[in-house]
Image (cartoon, coloured by chain):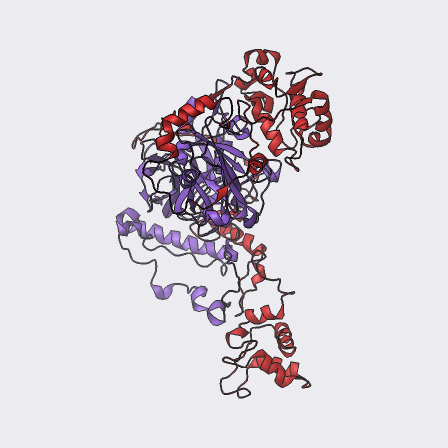
Amino acid sequence: MTDDRRPLPGRIQKAPENFLSAGQLALARRARRQFMGKALAMGAGVSAAAGSRAQPAASPAAMVDDPAIVRLPAHSTGLGQPVAARGYGSPSQWERNLQRRESPGLTRVSAASVSFAPLQGLFGIITPNGLHFERHHQGWWDIDPNQHRLMINGLVRQARVFTMDDLMRLPQVSRIHFIECGANTGMEWGNVAVPTVQYTHGMLSCCEYTGVLLSTLLDMVGADTKNGRYLLAEGADGSSMTRTIPMANALDDVMVAWAMNGEMLRPENGYPLRLVVPGIQGVSWVKYLRRIEVGDQPYDTKDEVLHYVDLMPDGRHRQYTSIQEVKSVITTPSGGQVLLDKGYYNVTGLAWSGRGKIRRVDVSFDGGRNWRTARLENPVLPKALTRFNIDWVWDGAPAILQSRAMDETGHVQPRLNQLRAVRGTRSIYHNNGIQSWRLAQTGEVFNVQTG
Amino acid sequence: MSRPVEASTQGKWLAGLLLTAACALVPVGAQPKPWADIGRPATPNEIKAWDIDVRADFTGLPPGSGSVDVGMDVWDTKCASCHGTFGESNEVFAPIVGGTTQADIASGRVANLTRSDFPQRTTLMKLSQLATLWDYVNRAMPWNAPKTLTTEEVYAVVAYILNLGDIVPDDFVLSDRNIAEIQQRLPNRNGKVFFEPMWRVDGKPDVQGDACMTNCRDEVVAISALPDFARDAHGNLGAQNRIVGPVRGADTGRPPIASLAEAAAVIESARATVVAAGATAPAVAVAPKLAAVDGQGGAADGQPPAALAAQANCMACHGVDRASVGPAFRQVADRYRGTPGALALLSGRVKNGVQGVWGQIPMPANATVPEEDIHRIVGWILDGAQ
């Protein structure tokens, strides 16, 4: 198997583009094509599946030297930066294209808007904190942690107040979970509306959170967990956003978290305290968390009555559609990207389910007619992103790439048309349909929906 | 706000309490947790200050009232700029008013919600609980000054919105005593369903895919794609993708490439996006200025000499106060204080290197540090390296 994943025998590595003009690169590419043609004619075996070890393209002595090797670069002949030149490190200057971005025209007020994570350029399952998607309902704040308080009241033996100092003394847990906005992929219910995976699926991130289990706090205040089947979570920001949380989840895996990926929460993500509600849509992960109330009825908050309700074909709204169901997407190659050559590709993507672990991911290269099962990378965790990879040799013909996830409950990610048959096209929320990327002969990839 | 124990539901609450006391309130045989004393009780005033939520059954609604007339005044001064004079504006937020009829008020279902051609879903079309509107205006409005409305103003604004939707008459006064009746006039009060399958983690999904592996479908065609004119609607996708790896972002400032042979142009235009934004690969051996990266580090021009010295790696061998491989900066300053031409002399030594002045360990040449930077660093050292 290992040999199957090796680069094509005889593949000419791309020269560093900063030394070659477009013309020179094109020349090199043509030279390679000619070799490939000859190799085919000679039956040298260029199929990657064959895994044969053909001879290199030309005798090494006849090949052009790579200036990136034979001319020592500046960084090999000079002195680099000292330690701590940047007290808080930043990504390479060459990585600046990967930014969270707004989708033009989606919202009209940037304080009540969303920025999407650049999934097309991320690896593994952890979202870097600076690229975590944002959703604010009334702007973000950077709150003084010494002034922040958490109150728990309602159906409790004793309403209590905790400072951050208090909370950070308590027994803590660290867990990896995804967060997905209920409206992720919401622009695509009716038709293709956006070009890239950043905009189709980028209201999705995954972090290692550290905090205290909500069940620990509920125990401390003597919560009536029998009659108190619902909790209200409330933020400290201007909108003081509120959401109803199921007590069943609260007693299971809900966290009151102060840290993400090894550092304190970023202000955009609720510093100094947020709720983490694994498997449930992001709107319930209340940021700047100031209060939790235990109650015996759901609360019908603004984001449970007017927004985050799913409009069905019969004109009724589904309320409390909280779980993010099984879903997956190929991130490379994906819409807006260009494949630079034929040959081997490691096709990669993400899968997740709000109901538990991912059991399997299948990938199709012919628009869903035939499927192959992808490799799942470890770790495969409940209610966390799971990274999948699959080998593919592109022969240069048009293709439609899809991925399809199945979770441990046996729920299989549906096609868009299966979703529409039940939920229509106006729901906005909870679109977990199979995503299609059309690869043209030119190498360019486009967002499409199939019939 | 949850109902307090003293409220009208006390009997029910106590009954529940008796049933569950053993398991929920006083865990049987449980020792107090060693962290049980962390935190403190909330005071009544603290709870009052924060426990402002109004539940669907109006639990938590403060007593009071407000008229349509007063609501109109509040609206014009604090709400209309975003929501429009009649709550109809779509400029800043989705419209609040519109799309409902008297027939909807009678049935409790908004007919326009079944129409796929109806352009907007207004607040009044969706609203199923009046408490929700009261609660949200109270906690989050006005947009730039939340929680500044008085209780009367909140009642009045809600009354005005209801009046704009022809749900209450012009002379109406909304209060805690009649709000439950008005709930029964909401056009969409019957238009929602609590959808348990997506509330419970063990709920049964309403849409199931299939796990077919081979020959699953007949012909596959793309039925929806972005139109050509929208190719760059999200900006240049070449500038939104990494410039290294197996793929690049398409240069959407240009038409799609005609064939794979043109991929070189895509590589080049992708690279240009970061170069244009300031990324540089120096041709000569000098570490790149940190200022080039996202505003981290100081601007090169205005960079303090101490930072320049650190960047030029002077601090690898010199301390400010303490000698290490080379002399401390303050030792240098002491020796050359008042020496004519010291700046030029020492700048030359920094640039070209020197040996024997402070011992036998040579000071290396620093040919790649810009001369201007050397002058500033040496001047700073001679001034005492403060």
Q: Splitting the image into 4 quarters, where does residue B206 fall?
A: top left
Could you say which is closer to the camera, residue A333 or residue B5?
Answer: B5
Residue B87 x/y as whole percent: 67, 25
Residue B4 x/y as whole percent: 51, 28
Q: Splitting the image into 4 quarters, where does residue B346 fall?
A: bottom right
Could you say which is closer to the camera, residue A232 or residue A386?
Answer: A232
Relative to B97, does residue A66 appear above or below in the rendering? below
Relative to B191, does residue A392 appear above or below in the rendering? below
The letter of the red chain is B
Relative to B260, does residue B381 appear above or below in the rendering? below
Q: Colour of chain A?
A: purple
Residue B122 visible, this orientation: no
Report the residue at 53% width, 22% height from top: B57
Residue A359 x/y as whole percent: 31, 38
Could you say which is closer to the camera, residue B197 or residue A9?
Answer: B197
Residue B74 visible, this orientation: yes
Tell me how many marks there are.
0
Q: Splitting the image into 4 quarters, where does residue B95 fall?
A: top right
Residue A296 x/y as whole percent: 45, 27
Report the residue at 67% width, 26% height from top: B152
Q: Quadrant of the C terminus of chain A?
A: top left
Relative to B64, does residue A364 appear above or below in the rendering? below
